Image (cartoon, rainbow, N blue to C red):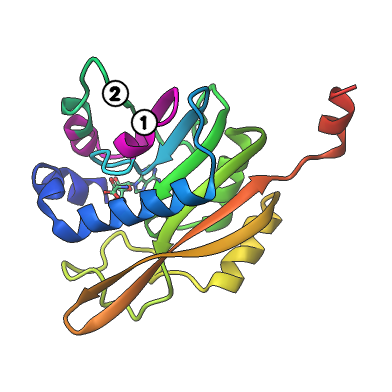
């Protein structure tokens, strides 16, 4: 799967649909979550950083996690002295990072991960107490969204209520779905949501406060 992204990395940012998705996903996240200048944020499946750099302009630091070295090379080439994203090529489901974040964002990567429950458990473990997630992906579709074929696509979008259950089971609360954008291509419509939630406070965390 990372082979496909390695091949298209050089052309990725030329895609107008991709730029639009990143723009509206960012707008949706920023209108729902207070992004603060003391926050450390992970962008999961950051790719070339289309979402990461928009987030980076508002927070202290963004780490862009991806499995495709070539996509991350494109991301790294956009770093400069005033705005940067730290690329990390690592499978965080198997090898967690040694860091917890204030929040995790992601755009259009979740459908490439086979086990969605394991993914949200990994997100949970990478978040500080009260940390948030803001994850964008397709609503359930019929498998026609990826015109290049469905290699490495494990989910044809997501049924929202079923996804809500998965996210809650992984330890999150306040799960809310927000419409971000609708992709129109080949006379079809593909709505994209951002789902936000917060890490559930467990009793032992509450005791720590006293
Ligand atoms: C459709 S692209 C989206 C890239 C970027 N978020 C954007 O909106 O342009 C999906 C990205 O997720 C990455 N990806 C897929 N599975 C992953 C995994 N298990 N861990 C990290 N990244 C993954 C791919 O390498 C690819 O760069």
In the rendered structure, the answer to whether residue 1 lies left or right of residue 62 reads left
Q: Secondary structure at mark 2?
A: loop
Residue 7 appears at what percent x and percent y?
Answer: 12, 47
Which of the two labelled residues, at mark 1 and mark 2, occupies the earlier sequence position?
1
Residue farthest top in this picture: 81
Q: Is residue 93 visible?
A: no
Closer to us: 68 or 105: 105
- Seen in the picture, residue 191 relative to 19 is either above or below; the reply is below
Give the x, y percent position of residue 175: 64, 58
> Does ligand 1 reach within 8 Å of label 2's beta carbon?
no
Residue 55 in view in this figure: yes
**Residues marked 1 and 2 touching at CB (< 8 Å):** yes
- At x 89% / y 28%, what residue is drawn? 207
**Residue sitting at x 54%, y 64%:** 177
Q: Which residues are magenta?
A: 52-74
Residue position for label 1: 56
Identify which residue is drawn at 33% across, 41% down. 46
Image quarter where the C terminus lies is: top right
The answer to which quarter of the image holds residue 167 is bottom right
Q: Residue 142: within the magenta?
A: no
User: Would you say residue 63 sits in the magenta stretch?
Assistant: yes
Q: How many marks?
A: 2
Locate residue 13, reporting x and y percent.
15, 47
Which mark identifies residue 66?
A: none
Residue assigned mark 2: 84
* Residue 131 position (above or below residue 183): above
Q: Position of residue 57 (x, y in %)?
A: 35, 30
Between 112 and 12, the residue placed more toward the observer is 12
Residue under the image location 55 percent in, 46 percent down: 133
Task: Give the secondary structure at mark 1.
Answer: helix
Callout 2 crowding tier (Cα within 10 Å): few <14, some 14–19, many ≥20: many
């Amino acid at each position: 799967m990372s082979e496909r992204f390695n091949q298209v990395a050089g052309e990725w940012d030329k895609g107008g649909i991709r730029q639009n998705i990143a723009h509206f996903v960012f707008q949706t996240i920023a209108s729902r979550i207070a992004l603060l200048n003391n926050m450390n944020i992970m962008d999961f499946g950051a790719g070339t950083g289309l979402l990461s750099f928009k987030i980076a302009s508002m927070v202290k630091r963004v780490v862009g996690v991806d499995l495709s070295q070539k996509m991350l090379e494109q991301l790294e080439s956009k770093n400069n002295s005033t705005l940067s994203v730290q690329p990390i090529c690592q499978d965080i489901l198997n090898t967690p990072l040694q860091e917890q974040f204030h929040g995790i964002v992601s755009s259009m990567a979740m459908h490439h991960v086979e086990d969605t429950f394991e993914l949200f458990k990994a997100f949970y473990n990478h978040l500080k107490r009260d940390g948030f997630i803001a994850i964008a992906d397709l609503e359930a579709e019929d498998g026609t969204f990826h015109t290049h074929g469905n290699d490495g696509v494990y989910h044809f979008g997501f049924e929202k209520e079923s996804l809500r259950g998965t996210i809650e089971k992984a330890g999150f609360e306040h799960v809310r779905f927000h419409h971000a954008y609708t992709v129109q291509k080949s006379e079809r419509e593909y709505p994209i949501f951002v789902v936000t939630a917060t890490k559930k406070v467990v009793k032992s965390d509450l005791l720590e406060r006293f």
